[in-house]
């Protein structure tokens, strides 16, 4: 029982650290790029919906999302294995 509690606490610490790293990486994005990324990932808007909301072209949304995803992959590369283990471990 105690080892399960320690494991659960460890999971929470890892989860908190990963969330902070993701938040930091998102915060480093340029303002418009960050806005587009958040609309897509947090609000689940499609590219066309984002384009309509921000009065920009879908191509601009695609370009900004590509830049955001490149940045996120680069910034979080060292955590990808941990993130995958953490995600898969909770299924």
Image (spheres, helix red, strand yellow):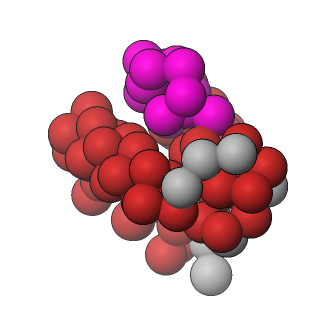
Give coordinates of residue 6: x percent, y percent.
63, 42
Q: Residue at x 54, y 20 (%)?
A: 31
Q: Residue at x 62, y 81 (%)?
A: 91
Q: Residue at x 48, y 34 (%)?
A: 33
Quadrant assignment, res 49: bottom right
* In the image, residue 78 above or below residue 60: above
Give coordinates of residue 51: x percent, y percent.
65, 55
What is the magenta segment's predominant secondary structure? helix
Q: How many marks?
A: 0
Screen quadrant of the N terminus: bottom right
* In the image, residue 48 above or below residue 54: below
Q: Residue at x 30, y 43 (%)?
A: 67
Q: Is residue 67 magenta?
A: no
The residue nearer to you, when weighing 88 against 57, is: 57
Q: Please report the bounds of the magenta region as a residue range.
A: 21-35
Q: Residue furthest bottom?
A: 91
Give coordinates of residue 52: x percent, y percent.
74, 57
Residue 30 lies left or right of residue 69; in this view the side is: right
Residue 85 lies left or right of residue 54; in this view the side is: left
Give coordinates of residue 14: x percent, y percent.
52, 38
The residue nearer to you, when weighing 24 against 60, is: 60
- Examine the rendering and report whether any part of residue 39 can be seen: no
- Examine the rendering and report whether any part of residue 59 can be seen: yes
* In the image, residue 20 above or below residue 39: above
The residue nearer to you, when weighing 38 against 74, is: 38
* In the image, residue 7 above or below residue 85: above
Q: Is residue 31 magenta?
A: yes
């Amino acid at each position: 029982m105690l080892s399960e509690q320690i494991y659960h606490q460890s999971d929470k610490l890892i989860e908190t650290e990963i969330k902070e790293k993701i938040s930091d990486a998102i915060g480093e994005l340029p303002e418009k790029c960050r806005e587009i990324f958040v609309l897509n990932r947090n609000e689940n808007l499609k590219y066309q919906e984002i384009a309509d909301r921000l009065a920009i072209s879908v191509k601009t949304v695609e370009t900004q999302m590509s830049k955001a995803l490149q940045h996120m992959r680069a910034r979080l590369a060292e955590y990808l294995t941990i993130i995958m283990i953490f995600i898969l471990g909770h299924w």
